[in-house]
Image (spheres, helix red, strand yellow):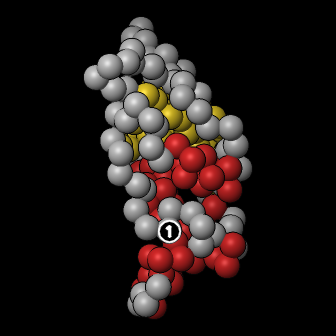
Amino acid sequence: MGKASDKLAVLGIEGKVDESFGPLVSKWLDGGSDGKSQRLAQLCALYRLEPHSIGHLRYQLFHRTAAAILEAKRFKSDTAILIVQSFCPKSTGLDDASAFFNAIGLPGLGAGKLLGPQPFDGVELWVGWANDSATSNVTYPIDISHP
């Protein structure tokens, strides 16, 4: 929780090194239960996506992004921010994150960029990608200042 300008905001951080954002939706659903299908249908409704068109996207991004949005709603905030903090010099996962955020209406993800807002169920979503490795300078897509 924090403030963005004069608004309460929920900030979610997803830390990554060189691992993926989990299985593709098509693999995650393969042999799955009715519960998985129902969960995915709810996520697709939130993002205004058709379930048959998302098999190439990574499931973890659906889940993590929804968590930020739902937490914002829970705390009666109209702003959710999700930052992927990459500790990989090769930015492993950037292409997958870009594909997901593009699919939900936030194209152009890259290091040091904050994209948004995009409204989902009464919450404005912002997303970003921050690079950090032992051999590079730290870059943050948001200027964090204290009054």
Residue 86 coordinates in the image, percent (x, y): 39, 36
User: Toward which corner of the image does residue 125 lie, by quadrant?
Assistant: top right
Quadrant containing the N terminus is top left
Number of residue marks: 1
Residue at left offset 53%, top offset 35%: 128
In the displayed structure, does residue 111 sit left or right of residue 16?
right
- Front-most of residues 84 and 94: 94
Residue 37: x percent and y percent?
A: 50, 84
Q: Which of the two residues, 139 or 117, is positioned nearer the viewer here?
A: 139
Q: Residue at x 39, y 15 (%)?
A: 137
Amino acid at pointer 1: Leu
Q: Is residue 22 in view?
A: yes
Residue under the point 50% across and 22% down: 142
Dot 1: element: loop
**Viewer-closest of 105 and 78:** 105
Q: Residue furthest top?
A: 147
- Which residue is rendered at x = 33% and y = 41% of the image? 17
> Residue 23: which quarter of the image?
bottom left
- Residue 2 x/y as whole percent: 40, 29
Q: Which residue is mark 1?
A: 24
For residue 120, above or below residue 118:
below
- Please state, as top left, top right, bottom left or bottom right, where the C terminus lies in the image: top left
Badge 1 density bin: few <14, some 14–19, many ≥20, Cα 10 Å? some
Q: Is residue 42 visible?
A: no
